[in-house]
């Protein structure tokens, strides 16, 4: 990414010095240490105050961890559940049971691919109506066995193709919103990457909404917004700022409840640490929710979403 160019140049220089040191048996320790300090200073300066567009770019890093990367690090005994019992098994949605430090839990998320082949299988993380029906079937199963639910959001949106319209994607998402509001078990939502439009909201109703520091959650992608407003996708940077979809902005607007810290430079720099930070937040929030009665849980969830947004009377 362009804003990381200076950091990458210095890291490349450090690599060259280390190569010289190995091949020529020349002590380059002082020079390497000085450059390493400079890199850390530059990283702190760069990543501490990212613009919304830079957050979008970092969120789309090809090595950024996806839902199953976190499942692998947070859960033991994970067993995946497939199919919507109506038509298909949408690979863009993963669901299953696992144990979080011994506690049984339902896990649900949108899953992107790591390469072209996997992205085609996962449909780039964009679910069809079958995926949302699969998710609802799974959440009802969790409710039946009184299991808390953790959802991972990482999608550009629901699949916008004609097949989705033919199978009523809007109805499938709307039904999930309605049913998730009434689930009789605690639900924690974690936005780990891209949270796009109704495709994200289809599994995004919960008692607590957590968001990773460099994730982005908005009604539309910056490019899509720019194409509609200005008929120019090149104005995506301007749109990213206008949409106010960064974690910091959404916390101020009370759309999310908590920002989960990422390692310096993004979650892909240290997936283990990113997962540990998320695990701590998830466990703490579930512990708080377990102390609520069922009426208090459902009432709090309703009031949380009902309070979103403001309006003003104009004289």
Image: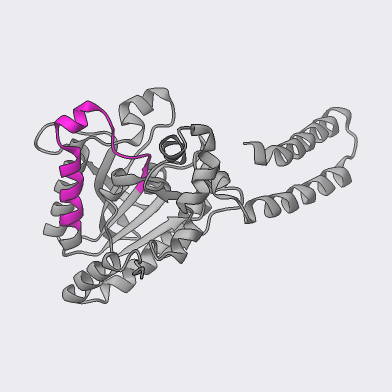
173 inside magenta stretch: yes
Q: Position of residue 306 (x, y in %)?
A: 26, 66
Q: Is residue 24 depicted above or below 68 in this figure?
A: above
> Residue at (84%, 30%) from the top-left corner?
20
Q: Pick out the residue farthest to the top.
A: 117
Q: Position of residue 158 (x, y in %)?
A: 29, 38
Q: Would residue 86 appear left or right of 135 to someone viewing this image?
A: left
Q: Is residue 44 depicted above or below 133 in this figure?
A: below
Q: Position of residue 65 (x, y in %)?
A: 46, 42
Q: Pick out the residue farthest to the front.
A: 315
Residue 82 showing in the rendered view? no
User: Which of the image's four quarters has the N terminus?
Assistant: top right
Q: Looking at the image, which is closer to me, 74 or 156?
A: 156
User: Which of the image's four quarters has the C terminus?
Assistant: bottom left
Image: magenta residue range: 153-180
307 inside magenta stretch: no
> Residue at (29%, 36%) from the top-left corner?
92
Q: Pick out the residue farthest to the left.
A: 86
Task: Tell me which secondary structure the magenta stretch mostly adopts.
Answer: helix
* Quadrant of the image occupied by residue 269: top right
Q: Pick out the residue farthest to the right.
A: 26
* Quadrant of the image occupied by residue 100: bottom left
Q: Position of residue 85 (x, y in %)?
A: 10, 38
Number of dots carrying numbers: 0
């Amino acid at each position: 990414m362009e804003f990381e160019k200076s950091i990458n140049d210095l890291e490349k220089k450090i690599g060259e010095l280390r190569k010289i040191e190995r091949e020529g048996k020349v002590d380059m320790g002082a020079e390497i240490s000085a450059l390493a300090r400079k890199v850390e200073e530059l990283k702190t300066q760069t990543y501490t105050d990212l613009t919304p567009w830079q957050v979008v770019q970092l969120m789309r890093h090809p090595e950024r961890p996806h839902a199953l990367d976190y499942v692998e690090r947070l859960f033991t005994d994970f067993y995946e559940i497939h199919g919507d019992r109506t038509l298909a098994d949408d690979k863009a949605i993963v669901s299953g049971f696992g144990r979080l430090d011994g506690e049984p839990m339902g896990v649900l998320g949108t899953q992107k691919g790591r390469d072209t082949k996997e992205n085609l299988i996962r449909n780039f993380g964009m679910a069809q109506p079958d995926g949302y029906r699969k998710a609802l079937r799974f959440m009802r199963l969790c409710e039946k066995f009184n299991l808390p639910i953790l959802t991972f959001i990482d999608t550009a949106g629901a699949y916008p193709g004609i097949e989705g319209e033919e199978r009523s994607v809007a109805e499938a998402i709307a039904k999930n919103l309605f049913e998730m509001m009434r689930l009789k078990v605690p639900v924690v939502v974690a936005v780990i990457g891209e949270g796009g439009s109704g495709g994200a909201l289809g599994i995004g109703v919960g008692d607590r909404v957590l968001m990773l520091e460099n994730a982005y959650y908005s009604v539309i992608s910056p490019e899509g917004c720019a194409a509609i407003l200005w008929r120019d996708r090149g104005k995506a940077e301007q749109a990213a700022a206008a949409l106010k979809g960064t974690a910091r902005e959404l916390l101020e607007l009370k759309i999310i409840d908590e920002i989960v810290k990422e390692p310096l430079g993004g979650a892909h720099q240290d997936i283990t640490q990113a997962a540990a930070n998320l695990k701590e937040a998830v466990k703490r929030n579930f512990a708080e929710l377990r102390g609520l009665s069922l009426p208090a849980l459902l009432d709090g969830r309703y009031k949380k979403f009902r309070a979103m947004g403001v309006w003003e009377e104009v004289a």
